[in-house]
């Protein structure tokens, strides 16, 4: 992948991490601005400096104990498999290895363990120990580096950082006009330099937003930036506004795939997606929908031998929210489509995937319904819903029963 317009940031990071031996570096910025892309680029360039490079995404809110276990196994070359019970003692063991070996640890999407919508930098319930990890890795005498990306600054970083401190943060803003234009060079857009500037500025130079918006410019305005700018008056707040517009343009099949990718949480094969469907889709239709979603920059492909599909973190979050809002809205209506067609949590999923399905999908739905209907209200609605469905269907369709059982337990 080409990284446009980040030369300055790359040089700065290489100095901090390489020459100045910074112990903790936070890359901060809004969703889609390019934090992961930058870190992946720098980590690849600097991998010869380190004995071990360990990368984990916290997008599924990986519990700290799991992270520590996997990380210690890796940096100890599988020597250290048994760990003490207390988190503090586990962190001490990790620091022992960070002192003796030069390691690069990357924690991507750190905001997933921070509380959304709260005073910046507070931890989600059950995740406060991540703060301890940052504190201790930042303060201890050691030769490794913890590099994290986050949409919000963790408070430990704010406390420890400084020009002379081994803890730093880099705020990433959007791309400049030239870099944005370069990135979109093969998307078939055209316009004067001023029009390109206006386009890049309208989306604050956000690479994800620019990629996503380039498709409707091409499809609806035949690539004419000026015309798009004239007709599209809506201001860009954040990536969600843009995704809202794009989501409405999707076909039924495309939306269905997006929802399933949000449920799956991890990269999924064509086969895996097909197995989920309540009403089968022909392979042709499915491939067409996937190709169209790729054109719209809404999905990413992974893997070489067998293609796997997944969603960008910002898009995953948007689709997850959209799904749980729909589920709570449709719960007491005549046609609870989402409840029939999608599993809000999958019994067959890996443990930590199922945990995140519950945490990010099922629990928010349950909370909403509880607030709106109360426990008895929910039970009454469930009885009504099942009676109604039984009248129409010989057998209760799709995921309805499974979802309801999961909701009630
Ligand atoms: N400088 C760049 N040049 C080219 N493409 C870029 C650049 N920065 C980001 N991108 C692309 O833009 C998209 C979003 O970038 P990225 O995933 O790095 O965002 P992010 O800041 O990590 O977002 P999130 O907070 O949601 O994790 C990706 O498809 C990425 O490849
Ligand atoms: Mg990212």
Image (spheres, rainbow, N blue to C red):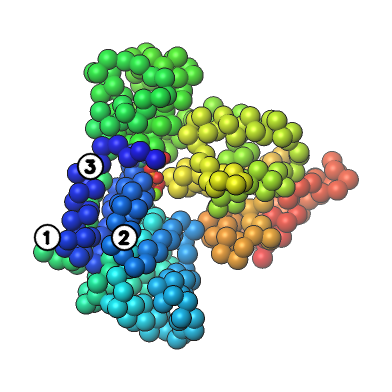
Residue with the most extreme right position: 394
Q: Residue at x 63, y 53 (%)?
A: 344
Q: Residue at x 69, y 60 (%)?
A: 348
Q: CA separation, marks 3 and 1?
A: 21 Å
Q: CA separation, marks 1 and 2?
A: 26 Å
Q: Cβ of disc 1 within 8 Å of ligand 1?
A: no
Q: Where residue 98 sits: x, y (%)?
A: 31, 74
Viewer-nearest residue: 343 or 275: 275
Q: Where residue 120 sits: x, y (%)?
A: 30, 57
From the image, tell me which residue sits under label 1: 163
Q: Residue at x 34, y 44 (%)?
A: 34
Image quarter of the C terminus: bottom right
Q: Give the crowd class for mark 3: few <14, some 14-19, many >=20 residues within 10 Å.
A: few
Taking the image as shown, residue 31 lies to the left or right of residue 381, namely left
From the image, tell me which residue sits under label 2: 48
- Disc 3 is placed on an element classified as helix
Could you say which disc has been placed on residue 7 in the image?
Answer: 3
């Amino acid at each position: 992948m080409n990284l446009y317009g980040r030369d300055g940031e790359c040089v700065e990071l290489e100095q901090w991490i390489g020459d100045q031996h910074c112990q903790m570096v936070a890359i901060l910025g809004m969703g889609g601005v390019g934090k992961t892309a930058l870190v992946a680029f720098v980590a690849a360039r600097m991998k010869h400096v380190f004995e071990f490079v360990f990368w984990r995404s916290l997008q599924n809110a990986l519990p700290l104990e799991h992270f520590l276990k996997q990380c210690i196994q890796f940096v100890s070359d599988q020597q250290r498999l048994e760990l003490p019970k207390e988190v503090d003692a586990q962190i001490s063991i990790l620091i022992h290895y960070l002192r003796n070996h030069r390691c690069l640890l990357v924690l991507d999407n750190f905001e997933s363990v921070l509380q959304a919508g709260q005073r910046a930098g507070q931890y989600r319930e059950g995740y406060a120990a991540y703060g301890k990890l940052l504190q201790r890795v930042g303060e201890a005498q050691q030769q490794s580096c913890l590099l994290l990306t986050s949409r919000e600054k963790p408070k430990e970083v704010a406390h420890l950082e400084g020009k002379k401190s081994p803890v730093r943060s880099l705020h990433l803003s959007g791309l400049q006009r030239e870099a944005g234009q370069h990135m979109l060079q093969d998307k078939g857009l055209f316009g004067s330099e001023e029009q390109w500037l206006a386009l890049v500025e309208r989306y604050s130079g956000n690479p994800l937003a620019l990629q996503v918006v380039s498709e409707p410019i091409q499809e609806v305005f035949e690539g004419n930036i000026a015309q798009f700018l004239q007709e599209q008056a809506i201001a860009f707040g954040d990536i969600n506004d843009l995704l809202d517009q794009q989501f409405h343009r999707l076909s039924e099949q495309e939306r269905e795939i997006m929802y399933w990718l949000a449920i799956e949480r991890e990269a999924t094969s064509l086969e895996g997606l097909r197995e989920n469907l309540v009403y089968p889709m022909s392979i042709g239709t499915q491939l067409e929908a996937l190709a169209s979603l790729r054109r719209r920059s809404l999905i990413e492909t992974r893997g070489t031998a067998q293609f796997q599909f997944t969603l960008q973190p910002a898009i995953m979050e948007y689709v997850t929210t959209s799904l749980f809002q729909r589920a709570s809205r449709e719960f007491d209506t005549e046609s609870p489509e989402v409840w029939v067609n999608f599993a809000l949590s999958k019994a067959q999923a890996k443990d930590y995937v199922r945990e995140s399905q519950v945490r990010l999908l099922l629990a928010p739905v349950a909370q909403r319904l509880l607030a709106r209907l109360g426990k008895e209200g929910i039970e009454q609605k469930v009885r009504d819903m099942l009676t109604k469905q039984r009248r129409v269907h010989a057998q209760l369709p799709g995921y309805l029963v499974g979802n309801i059982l999961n909701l009630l337990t």
